Amino acid sequence: MSSLVSLVTAAITLISTFLVSIFGYGVDIADTTKAYRERVAGLTFYENTIETALPQTIVYDMVSEHFDSPLPDGKTEKKAIIIGFDGGRADALDAFSVENGGSKMLLESGGKAYIAYAGGANFPLPIIQATSTAPGWCSILTGKWGLETGIINNGITKAVEPKTLLTTLVEDGKADQTMFQVSWGGHFTSDNSTYKLEKAYCEENSLNVVFGKNPDDPGTHASMLAAVTEPDCPDFIMGIYEHMDAAGHGTGYTVNNPDYQQAYIDSETCAGELIAAIESRPTYEQEDWLIVITSDHGGKWSGHGTLYIQERMIFIVTNKEITQ
Ligand SMILES: [Zn+2]
């Protein structure tokens, strides 16, 4: 029986390699819905299942509730950070595999990992927004789906309302400063970028919201590290690493792709460095930090945006339990 399995696996690998040689990108025919479900079910660190996946908008609720809840004894300041792994699939989270990785650090010190969904509805219901970058991060930052924000796909500029946490936390006096660090122009720099109008609103109203555009992931990482090591660092920091999405588009979103696996390791390493820097802050003991690692969407073959389960399920790893 096991020799038959080996033979089938070898045949699938051979056919996939053949297809890649024709199409030039990551076609992994072993990446079936069934295989995906089995892998996710085997990841025992998840608190929930695909069937009970949380909406990705819950990240907004987590951050809002963090800033609204009273300070614990001995703490004098609220802080929160969202570390984004763009294009990270739920089955790619190999939380304990990366030494000094962000997820491992969080889970080993009492944190929790959850399966969440992008697209506006859990599998197998029809999606109501593309499983893509702009809708994913916009739902995380506004707590709303595309029907309310208008961001049902990339390349759409959101009206000022509904505003993101970046702006509302400052306007409501819950944060002195917030910060958004990215390298993709589609967030707030290109003509049809998502937050172009919100960024202009912040500038017109002299709101202390930093929109940081970096040339690439190393640039984003340097900006993030600089932010968390500042004595008076922003109260809410959001940063997005593109390693996984770049590898997925390049050679395939699948855990069978070594490039995609390496991109995951690189993202975890960045997250680990950020968390270590936060924990080394001289004022860390007086600060109440919410730390979240999450992704905007998954992917299948070399793309994303549609309703495949591999595109829809994402992860949330956090140092605080989600209570709802
Ligand atoms: Zn993305």
Image (cartoon, helix red, strand yellow):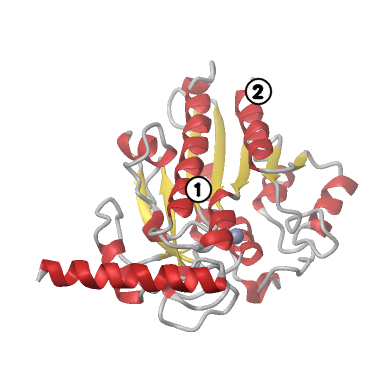
Where 78 sits versus 295, above or below?
above
Q: Is mark 1 within 8 Å of ligand 1?
A: no
Specify the farthest residue to the right.
Answer: 204
Q: Amino acid at mark 1?
A: Ala
Residue shown at 36% from the left, 33% from the top:
99
Name the image quarter holding residue 236: top right
Please tell me whether mark 1 sits on a helix, a strand or a loop. helix
Where on the image, by quarter, is ligand 1? bottom right
Name the image quarter holding residue 131: bottom right
Q: Can residue 12 be seen from the camera position used here?
A: yes
Q: Residues within 10 Å of mark 1 (few under 14, many from 20)?
A: many
Q: Nearer the viewer, residue 94 or 130?
A: 94
Q: In this figure, which residue is indicated by the disc labeled 2?
A: 230
- CA distance separating discs 2 and 1: 27 Å
Picture coordinates of residue 183, whole percent (x, y): 70, 47
Q: In this figure, which residue is indicated by the disc labeled 1?
A: 263
Residue shown at 52% from the left, 27% from the top:
278
Where 72 sits versus 292, above or below?
above
In primary-sequence order, the first of circles 2 and 1 is 2
Where 81 sits versus 225, above or below?
below
